């Protein structure tokens, strides 16, 4: 099992984010989870994947002071 930390980032439109191991993101419509290694932020909460994306099975656990 791989554990990912949830993190709030302040980024600007046009920023390109690259991760050696990958980041996970959830599709807003289908709710399917994907592993991506590089993406460009388009602004207003939208991004575009650069390169490949891999569908992954994710179990989401909330942690911290806002955990249920």
Image (cartoon, helix red, strand yellow):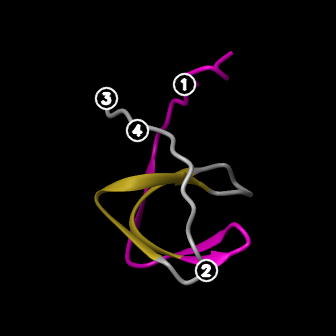
Q: Secondary structure at mark 1?
A: loop
Q: Nearer the viewer, mark 1 or mark 3?
A: 1
Q: Is residue 4 left or right of residue 33?
A: left
The residue lying toward the viewer, choosing from 10 and 34, is 10
* 10 Å crowding of disc 3: few (<14), some (14-19), many (20+): few
Between marks 4 and 3, how big is the CA–CA gap?
10 Å
- Give the residue pinned by disc 2: 13
Residue 61, labelled with which disc? Answer: 1
* 10 Å crowding of disc 1: few (<14), some (14-19), many (20+): few
Q: Nearer the viewer, mark 4 or mark 3?
A: 4
Between marks 2 and 4, how big is the CA–CA gap?
24 Å
Q: Is residue 37 left or right of residue 44?
A: left
Between marks 1 and 2, how big is the CA–CA gap?
29 Å
**Dominant secondary-structure state across the stretch colored magenta:** loop
- Identify which residue is drawn at 74% across, 57% down: 29
In this rendering, is residue 13 above or below 25? below
Snapshot quadrant of residue 10:
bottom right
Q: Position of residue 42 (x, y in %)?
A: 63, 80
Residue 27, labelled with which disc? Answer: none
């Amino acid at each position: 099992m791989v554990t990912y930390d949830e993190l709030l980032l302040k980024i600007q439109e046009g920023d390109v984010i690259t991760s050696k191991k990958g980041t996970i993101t959830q599709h807003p419509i289908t709710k399917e989870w994907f592993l991506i290694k590089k993406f460009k932020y388009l602004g207003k909460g939208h991004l575009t994947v650069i390169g490949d994306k891999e569908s992954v099975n994710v179990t989401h656990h909330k942690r911290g002071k806002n955990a249920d």
